[in-house]
Image (cartoon, rainbow, N blue to C red):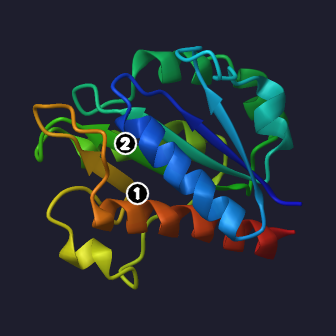
Amino acid sequence: MIKVLVLFHSSQGSVRAMAQTIAEAIISQGAEPVLRTFTQQLESDIVVSLDDLKQCHALAFGSPTRFGMMAHQAKQFWETTSDLWLRGTLIDKPAAVFCSSSSMHGGNEATLLNLSLPLLHHGMLLLGVPYDIPELSSTKSGGTPYGASHVSGLTAETKLTPEEIQICRAVGARLVTIARKMQ
């Protein structure tokens, strides 16, 4: 069974909604999503371990936008992964990134690129969102070729738009498809 680690930090709930949508797509593809957070925010949250990274076949990594960068909780975790990097544990595992900001020009694309850096250092295969996903061309909110994104607005709206939902689903499905091809 393909296991996809859906690793995220969510401060207002938007990134959590994206993670859950990605997880639903993973399930619909007959694979197992493993949802993990960097810190326990809800009672049901399970905090990520290095074993979660070792055991996954693919990774979806998400964070809120913090001045065009990942949340510090995510950065702190990646700084503990040097042993995995030295062993090449994550080399050739497919990965995708997702994020949320409060404004349309709040740094989503910069954040997606920032989220990609530790994955590339680990030798992971970074998957974007290809333009055969029609919602990528029609969205008026989140969604980029670098990864899924959400724009919450100043009211911190956690409800994803129909286009954002489809883009998140495409990310989850693509991770499973590529992970299967890598087996």
> How far from the left and from the top, in percent, is residue 108?
26, 44
Categorize mark 2 by other alpha carbons within 10 Å: few (<14), some (14-19), many (20+).
many
**Judging from the image, what secondary structure is the residue with disc 1 in?**
loop
For image coordinates 55% across by 36% down, the residue present is 118
For image coordinates 13% across by 31% down, the residue present is 155
Q: Is residue 132 above or below residue 47?
A: below
The N terminus appears in which quarter of the rendering? Answer: bottom right
The C terminus appears in which quarter of the rendering? Answer: bottom right
Kindly identify the amino acid type of the residue bearing the numbered disc 2: Cys
> How far from the left and from the top, in percent, is residue 85?
73, 33
> How far from the left and from the top, in percent, is residue 119?
58, 43
The foreground one among 14 and 131 is 14
Q: Which residue is mark 1?
A: 147
Callout 2 touching callout 1 (CB < 8 Å): yes
Q: Which residue is mark 2?
A: 99
Q: Is residue 90 above or below residue 165?
A: above
Give the spatial CA distance, label 2 vs label 1. 8 Å
Categorize mark 1 by other alpha carbons within 10 Å: few (<14), some (14-19), many (20+).
many
